[in-house]
Image (cartoon, rainbow, N blue to C red):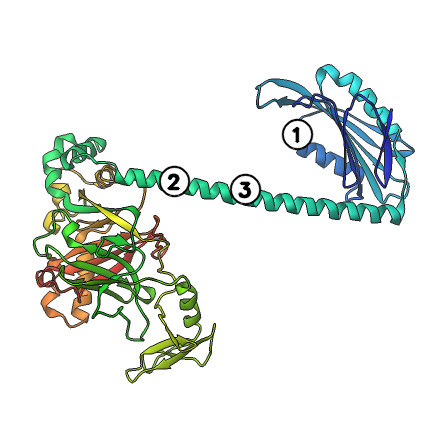
Amino acid sequence: MKLVETPEFSVEANPMFENTRIFAGSIGLRRHPETAFSPQMSVWSAKRERKSPEKWLSDRLKDDGGKIIGREAVTFAGMPGEMSKVKDRLQDWETKEKRNWYRLRALLVSADGSTWYHATAMVSEPELAEIETDFKRLLESLRLKLEGNAANKVRAAAEAETAAVVEKLKDSMEKVSAIRIQQSQEERRLENAAAATEPVAGIEERFNAAVADAGLQDKREALRLIVMPTVAMVECNAADPEITGLSRIGGGPDLPADTDWPRDDNGLHLNYLAQINLADVPDRPEELPASGLISFFTGTDYTDWRVLYTPADATLTPHTVSEDAMDAAISVSQMIVWDSDLKRFVPNGQAVDGLSVSTDEAGRLTFSRDGVPVRAFASEYEFSRSAQTLRFERSLSAPFGQRGPNNNPRAYADIGIEDPSDFSIAVSERFKIGDGPQHQMFGITGVRDLAAIQQMAAKHAAQSGWSDISAPDGWFILVKLASGGEADFNFSDHGDYVFMINRNDAVRADFSRVYAFVDSG
């Protein structure tokens, strides 16, 4: 036999256990070659538990699982305790071999009751008798070198060593996990990018497939009159910041030299969302210009928005969003307060993150740091992760509710369809491009019918005093921007940001009176 010891105790190990490990006050023994079924033993000490030894062992055996085939009172090395035998099954995950597997466990209590000594042996059935005999011999060879407070101090040091190693392992595992997550995200990004650039089938082919999915082939022609022309937009790849005028979502806007980044009535800069080059858009409604750039911005809580139109012959200047823009927006929000009398934000007297604030004659706020102007944004949330170019494809969308073309509430019912939701979902799925967010222009989106959102836009126009565009039928969806993707906007709990325009304004390339809302949930 060979003597194996820790600062607190020692045992005499059988030479058949060639591999001996001593770590943080515990002893581990394994037989070569080390396989899934190699016999193994362990011995360690621990401070007593609040439960009785009998209750602790019962709970542990229950948690471990397997069938208890033996449990008896024992005394080893002058210490009383219990020993158990459990039968279970173990599989070698490489070879897929399964064997009966036995776990022997002993719990011994020191004379003063302050220390519990644990020991386990694990073995497959062919070697059970041999290992069980040697396990009992090992326990009888147990000799205590320290007891009482001296043992407690050694054990505390061992526990600290264990905790340090566990923390180091945890840190390593977290780093490995972060790398794997990053790799998975990159693989997913590449898959989405590939899917977003794949050719799509023709309009009619995809529509026929949607009709078949819904089991409505006999109503194909009637349904074709109900669906609405739409243009799908999907993120394609990272946008080149050196190229101006690209259709893209995220990043910063391309603006003419004589056009400032738009600000709200408080002086805060509106958050940039996307820009669309109208020359890229297939099947534009005839009311829209054939060319030019439309740029989309939003303010605080989606209650303020702006759409700018830039003619195609304008010289564009790229604008960027600084890396600390979100932090600056958070700091700015802590420096202002709403004045209900003035109906605007005013400084609250606080200085945050080295920022200072001043107010111009119109009451608009400007911010600076060390005398250098800082662009303060209206929202701390609407910042993109990256700028992504947009791909455009002809598409169709189907009203989810009961309304059809020209807001006819009987369109579906007239052809014998009382619940068109399956058809609407089938159209949405068949015209989906890739797995990223499905942005779009025109058509219909969401579960609300077109008439309902036209009424919302008309009400906004009337309240704004725009009587010439207050008729509901004149409004149509200009753009829907979806949450997620590489741009990674998150509009009110992963919703869609919908911008609408009236035909009377569209024909004049006037985008100053758009209506916008977030469709979420």
- Disc number lying in front (3 or 1): 3
Distance between the alpha carbons at the discs numbered 1 and 2: 39 Å
Rendered residue at 81%/25% (across/down): 135
Q: For this view, does 159 lie left or right of residue 219?
A: right
- Disc number lying in front (1 or 2): 2
Pointer 1 residue: 65
Distance between the alpha carbons at the discs numbered 2 and 3: 18 Å
Among the two numbered marks 2 and 3 on one chain, the one whose residue lies closer to the N terminus: 3
Pointer 2 residue: 188
Among the two numbered marks 3 and 1 on one chain, the one whose residue lies closer to the N terminus: 1
Pointer 3 residue: 176
Rendered residue at 71%/36% (across/down): 59
**Amino acid on which disc 2 is placed:** Arg
Q: Is residue 85 visible?
A: yes
Picture quarter containing residue 8? top right
Q: Is residue 317 above or below residue 411?
A: below
**Amino acid on which disc 3 is placed:** Val
Judging from the image, what secondary structure is the residue with disc 3 in?
helix
Rendered residue at 30%/38% (across/down): 194
Q: For this view, does 316 lie left or right of residue 109?
A: left
Judging from the image, what secondary structure is the residue with disc 2 in?
helix
Q: Quadrant of the N terminus?
A: top right
Among the two numbered marks 1 and 2 on one chain, the one whose residue lies closer to the N terminus: 1
